[in-house]
């Protein structure tokens, strides 16, 4: 029997093409899994999704479940330069995803999947009892941030009254929606957002870390490879292009940038490349590439990598 996995994405119209690359990578590398894709979007012109819907159905036989959600309720919420209000859509997952869906994998759209996700498809959550609401049960599984980020963010949340030495990245999460519904999690997340909005640095990710304090389990880092400078001995199963610089930026130096274009070429937008290319950036990029190579060589000589 084929393993089965529900996968959730949440996007605005700006991210359609980038989401398509992430989706293509997932479908290319996990044809052996019975995938059920749920796409949450917040724009009214559904024709913008026509190309990706037809592509997924034609090439993979996948029908994407579309769910419209008005994001205007987040208009007064804080966002960053490379983050839009769409990021808060994941706070409402239990209100958005059909009640028949108990668990699933949430993926940010700036990710690529490079291998099989059988372990995630076979992951089982313990159910909680509505009367006892055991705090030891896990509501999500996620990957810890890299040490320096984890330390800084856990100290910041501790000062807000959420005493912790942990902090996870919310770009890849295995979610127990059944447990979320039992404890009315979406409403509680929104309350926290309203209460702490002015103190947030990493937006909904901060809120999720506050609420799921001591109630999340840790995934292996290969499922959400973050802030990479050098290539690893083994290619991560999920590469996350976190941060402001993305592979579709000409000057981006991500060591696995080529994977983004590999799956872009396999999708419907194969003609797209950089959104910011200019002739004046060419010498600057070569200068940065040379510096990066020399630094890599130095670190190898020192035995650091």
Image (spheres, rainbow, N blue to C red):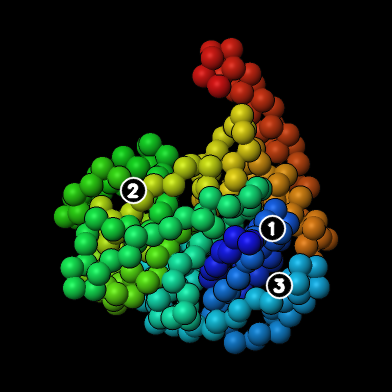
In the drawing, does residue 17 fall left or right of residue 41?
right
The residue drawn where x is 40% and y is 65% is 176
The residue drawn where x is 61% and y is 23% is 296
Residue 85 visible in the shown view? no
| Residue indicated by mark 3 | 62
Who comes first in sequence, dot 3 or dot 2?
Answer: 3
Say if mark 2 contacts mark 1, CB within 8 Å: no
Residue 289 visible in the shown view? yes
The residue drawn where x is 75% and y is 72% is 61
Who comes first in sequence, dot 2 or dot 1?
Answer: 1
Say if mark 3 contacts mark 2, CB within 8 Å: no
Quarter of the rendering containing residue 275: bottom right
Quarter of the rendering containing residue 52: bottom right
Crowding near the residue tagged with mark 3, few <14, some 14–19, many ≥20 C-alpha atoms within 10 Å: some
| Residue indicated by mark 1 | 32
Secondary structure at numbered mark 3: loop
Label ID, residue 113:
none
| Residue indicated by mark 2 | 167
User: From mark 2 to mark 1, how far is it between C-alphas?
Assistant: 33 Å
Tell me the mark number nearer the camera, choosing from 2 and 1: 1
The percent position of residue 13, horizontal first and vertical second, equals 61, 74
User: From mark 3 to mark 2, how far is it between C-alphas?
Assistant: 35 Å
Tally of numbered discs:
3
Up-down: is 263 above or below 268?
Answer: above
């Amino acid at each position: 029997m084929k393993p089965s996995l529900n996968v959730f994405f949440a996007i605005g119209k700006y991210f359609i093409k980038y989401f398509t690359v992430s989706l293509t990578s997932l479908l290319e590398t996990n044809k052996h899994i019975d995938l059920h894709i749920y796409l949450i979007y917040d724009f009214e012109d559904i024709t913008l999704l026509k190309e990706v819907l037809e592509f997924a159905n034609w090439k993979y036989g996948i029908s994407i479940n579309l769910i419209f959600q008005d994001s205007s309720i987040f208009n007064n919420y804080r966002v960053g330069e490379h983050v839009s209000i769409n990021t808060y859509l994941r706070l409402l997952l239990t209100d958005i995803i059909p009640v028949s869906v108990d668990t699933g994998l949430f993926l940010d759209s700036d990710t690529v999947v490079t291998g099989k996700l059988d372990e995630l498809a076979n992951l089982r959550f313990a159910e909680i009892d509505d009367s006892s609401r055991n705090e030891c049960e896990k509501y999500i599984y996620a990957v810890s941030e890299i040490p320096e980020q984890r330390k800084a963010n856990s100290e910041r949340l501790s000062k807000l009254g959420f005493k912790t030495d942990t902090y996870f990245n919310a770009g890849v999460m295995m979610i127990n929606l059944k447990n979320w519904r039992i404890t009315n999690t979406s409403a509680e997340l929104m309350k926290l957002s309203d209460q702490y909005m002015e103190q947030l640095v990493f937006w909904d990710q901060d809120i999720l870390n506050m609420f799921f304090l001591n109630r999340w389990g840790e995934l292996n880092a290969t499922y959400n490879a973050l802030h990479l400078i050098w290539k690893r001995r083994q290619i991560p199963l999920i590469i996350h292009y976190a941060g402001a610089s993305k592979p579709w930026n000409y000057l981006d130096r991500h060591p696995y940038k080529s994977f983004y274009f590999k799956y872009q070429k396999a999708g419907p937008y194969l003609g797209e490349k950089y959104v910011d290319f200019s002739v004046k950036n060419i010498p600057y990029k070569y200068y940065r590439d040379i510096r990066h190579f020399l630094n890599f060589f130095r670190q190898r000589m020192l035995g650091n990598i």
